[in-house]
Image: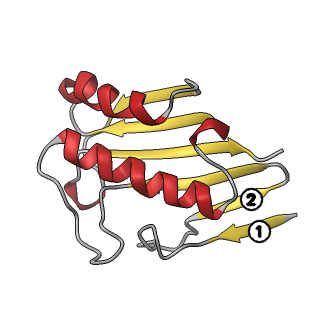
Amino acid sequence: MMKKVATEKAPAAIGPYSQGIIAGDFFFASGQIPINPATGNVEGDTIEQQAELVMKNVGCLLEAAGADYAKVVKTGCFLADMGDFAAFNEVYARYFTEKPARSCVAVKTLPKNVLCEVEVIAYLG
């Protein structure tokens, strides 16, 4: 059984996809970028500011799915510049205290030219 998860507390999907899907005991969240859900605008000029908003958006999706950061088993992190790795990690570590499995890669370009994007998989069981 699959169920779409949507919340106005996180940015709306900007393409043909869902904010998240619950499949069985797992929640799969689409990648979150630093968009303020109230305005639809990208916010933050630094990696720290953008990462903070990304983590808050991830948290809102987790809440909508009935989970929280402690339930996350895997993250995928995308950076526009691997030079931001250490600063990104400082923000990331405050939210993902249970240290889920993770991939972190630099990519050529992210949507809306943001500095970071994060997707998560959480266990709901």
Residue to which mark 1 is pinned: 3
How far across and how far down the image is residue 58, in percent? 48, 52
Q: Earlier in the sequence, mark 1 or mark 2?
A: 1
How far across and how far down the image is residue 94, in percent? 40, 32
Say what secondary structure mark 1 lies in.
strand
Q: Amino acid at mark 1?
A: Lys
- Residue nearest the viewer, comparing 93 with 41: 93
Task: Answer with the quarter of the image where residue 57 lies.
Answer: bottom left
Farthest-out residue, left: 45
In this image, 22 relative to 109: left or right? right
Relative to 107, say whether 26 is above or below.
below
Relative to 125, say whether 22 is above or below.
below
Residue to which mark 2 is pinned: 22
How far across and how far down the image is residue 37, in percent? 36, 72
Asked whether disc 1 touches disc 2, contact meaning CB atoms under 8 Å apart, the reply is: yes
Q: Residue at x 53, y 36 (%)?
A: 75
Q: Residue at x 45, y 73 (%)?
A: 15
Q: Amino acid at mark 2?
A: Ile
Q: Residue at x 18, y 24 (%)?
A: 83
- Residue nearest the viewer, comparing 113 with 51: 51
- Residue nearest the viewer, comparing 65 with 2: 65
Task: Answer with the quarter of the image where residue 80 lies.
Answer: top left
**Which numbered disc covers residue 82?**
none
Q: Quadrant of the N terminus?
A: bottom right
Crowding at dot 1, Cα within 10 Å, few <14 / some 14-19 / many 20+, comes out as few
How far across and how far down the image is residue 123, in percent? 74, 42
Q: Residue at x 21, y 33 (%)?
A: 81
Distance between the alpha carbons at the discs numbered 1 and 2:
5 Å
Q: Report the number of discs.
A: 2
